[in-house]
Image: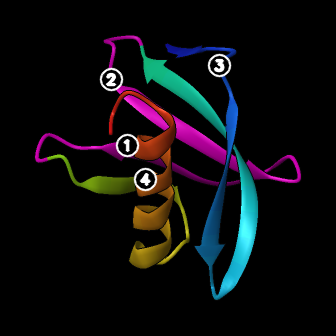
Amino acid sequence: MIQQTNNSFTIDVMIHGKTETLQVFPQETSDGVPYYTCKKDDETLTEIRRGVKQEWAQLWGELDKDSYIQIGQAIEEKTELG
């Protein structure tokens, strides 16, 4: 089961050479593992999470590694992860 919180926020990130504003929805699995659904214009672009080694991983989506790492770093700056 997936639990969704209502603490969404926006971030500005560079994707494919263009600055995009994404809406980020923090979520967690039923066993408490946090991950983030990132949307642009109500369309989900990616779902990412920070792994055990503190590295960002893409769970869903087709963004290149640089893009989802930039998203992860922007999430860190907006949350207590940073």
Q: Is residue 48 magenta?
A: yes
SS of the residue at dot 1?
A: strand
As rendered, which of 40 and 47 lies closer to the eye? 40
Disc 4 marks a residue whose amino acid type is Gly
Tell me, yes or no, whether the two marked residues, 1 and 2, touch with CB atoms within 8 Å.
yes
Instruction: Identify the magenta region.
Output: 30-53
Which residue is rendered at x = 39% and y = 74% of the image? 65
Residue 7, disc: 3
Which residue is rendered at x = 40% and y = 64% of the image? 69
Q: CA distance from mark 1 to mark 3?
A: 16 Å
How many other residues sit within 10 Å of disc 3, few (<14), some (14-19) or many (≥20)? few
SS of the residue at dot 2?
A: loop
Which residue is rendered at x = 32% and y = 39% of the image? 82
Disc 1 marks a residue whose amino acid type is Arg
Residue 72, disc: 4
Per the image, the residue denoted by label 1 is 49
Disc 3 marks a residue whose amino acid type is Asn
Which residue is rendered at x = 40% and y = 11% of the image? 30
